[in-house]
């Protein structure tokens, strides 16, 4: 298969269920807002039983409840019987340490049609050490937490819902410059799709199932490391390929995942040095969703 002259592997990406919250973070100015959104969503680490996240989109002050600039962020955990409790723990941790401590920030629920709600009083509200209050602002029930720089306001209930994690696209590139260019274009393309995030931005380290050191989590996908080409028998790096960036996608549903992956495919058009497009999977061992690239063309 080809797309705009670029070969596309007849393969699939393997995605799986996750549980997520969708939050609106606002702040007095863009500097504080950017810091809070980045701090709360940094460090993807679901493989260690924690959370991962990303910034979905920016929201102008004219469209936020409090009339201040905002960003929609998503935070995710792996799906399972204990997922709601795990999500509550992880979301609260990232709000306390990544958002509450940034001056002038506030947090609102930004998810409709929810599967359930996280109550924020116990793990976030009580940061007020008993001096917190529940108040109504902008037609929402908010917890007011007194701080040394004013108050932190957070909506008392945050909705959560099941979504799809792990959609991905790989680019086989003949230069690092081409890899960075196409990766940036893909990340930009995802940022225009409501409901989708990329938790890694451009990911330089696609992982594999198994490895010699399971105690540290997934290790490098060595058959696809260009620097090992010619050094190992199992190398699957084509001749002339020096960089293989991966774009990982989490989205509110399967159709949004496919839409984001399709945008990533289109992002490669016109980028000199992209020699092939593929996707990562785990041989069907990890996820319930198989998204075939041929169906996206």
Image (cartoon, rainbow, N blue to C red):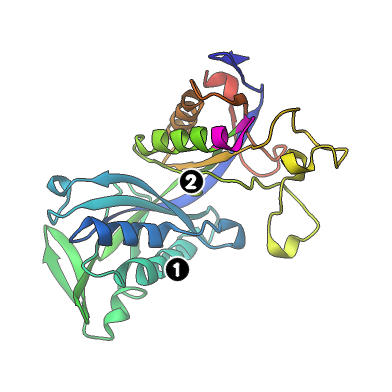
Label ID, residue 89 = 1
Residue 43 appears left or right of 195 = right
Residue 296 appears left or right of 123 = right
- Percent x, y for residue 155? 24, 63
Q: CA distance from mark 1 to mark 2?
A: 24 Å
Badge nearest the viewer, 1 or 2: 2
Q: Which residues are magenta?
A: 171-179
Closer to us: 290 or 114? 290
Residue 291 appears left or right of 189 = right
Q: Is residue 168 visible?
A: no
Which residue is painted at 77% across and 33% down in the image? 236
Please identify the residue farthest to the right as the structure is shown: 233
Which residue is painted at 75% across and 60% down in the image? 214
- Percent x, y for residue 244? 63, 37
Q: Is residue 105 visible?
A: yes
Q: Are marks 1 and 2 in contact (CB under 8 Å)?
A: no
Disc 1, SS: helix
Magenta region includes residue 177: yes
- Percent x, y for residue 288? 61, 39
- Percent x, y for residue 270? 48, 20
Closer to us: 198 or 76? 198
Residue 196 appears left or right of 166 = left
Which residue bears the numbered disc 2?
201
Closer to us: 260 or 36? 36
Classed neighbour count for the residue bearing mark 1: other residues with Cα under 10 Å, few (<14), some (14–19), many (≥20): some
Which residue is painted at 36% across and 34% down in the image? 193
Magenta region includes residue 131: no
Disc tally is 2
């Amino acid at each position: 298969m080809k797309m705009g002259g670029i070969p596309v592997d007849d393969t699939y990406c393997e995605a799986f269920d996750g549980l997520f919250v969708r939050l609106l973070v606002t702040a007095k100015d863009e500097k504080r807002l950017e810091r809070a959104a980045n701090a709360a969503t940094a460090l993807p680490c679901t493989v260690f039983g924690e959370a991962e996240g990303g910034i979905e989109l920016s929201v102008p002050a004219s469209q936020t409840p409090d009339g201040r600039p905002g960003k929609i962020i998503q935070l995710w955990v792996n799906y399972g019987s204990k997922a709601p409790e795990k999500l509550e723990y992880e979301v609260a941790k990232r709000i306390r340490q990544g958002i509450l401590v940034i001056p002038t920030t506030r947090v609102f629920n930004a998810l409709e049609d929810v599967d359930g709600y996280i109550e924020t009083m116990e793990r976030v509200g009580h940061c007020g050490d008993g001096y917190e209050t529940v108040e109504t602002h902008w037609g929402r029930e908010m917890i007011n937490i007194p701080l040394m720089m004013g108050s932190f306001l957070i909506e008392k209930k945050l909705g959560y819902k099941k979504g799809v994690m792990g959609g991905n696209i790989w680019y086989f590139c003949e230069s690092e410059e081409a890899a960075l260019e196409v990766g940036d274009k893909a990340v930009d393309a995802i940022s225009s799709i409501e409901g989708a995030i990329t938790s890694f931005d451009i990911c330089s380290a696609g992982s594999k199932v198994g490895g010699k050191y399971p105690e540290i989590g997934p290790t490098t996908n060595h058959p696809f490391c260009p620097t090992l080409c010619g050094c190992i028998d199992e190398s699957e790096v084509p001749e002339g390929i020096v960089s293989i960036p991966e774009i990982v996608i989490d989205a509110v549903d399967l159709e949004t995942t496919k839409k984001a992956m399709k945008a990533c495919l289109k992002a490669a058009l016109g980028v000199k040095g992209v020699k092939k497009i593929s996707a990562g999977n785990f041989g069907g061992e990890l996820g319930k969703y198989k998204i075939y690239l041929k169906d996206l063309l």
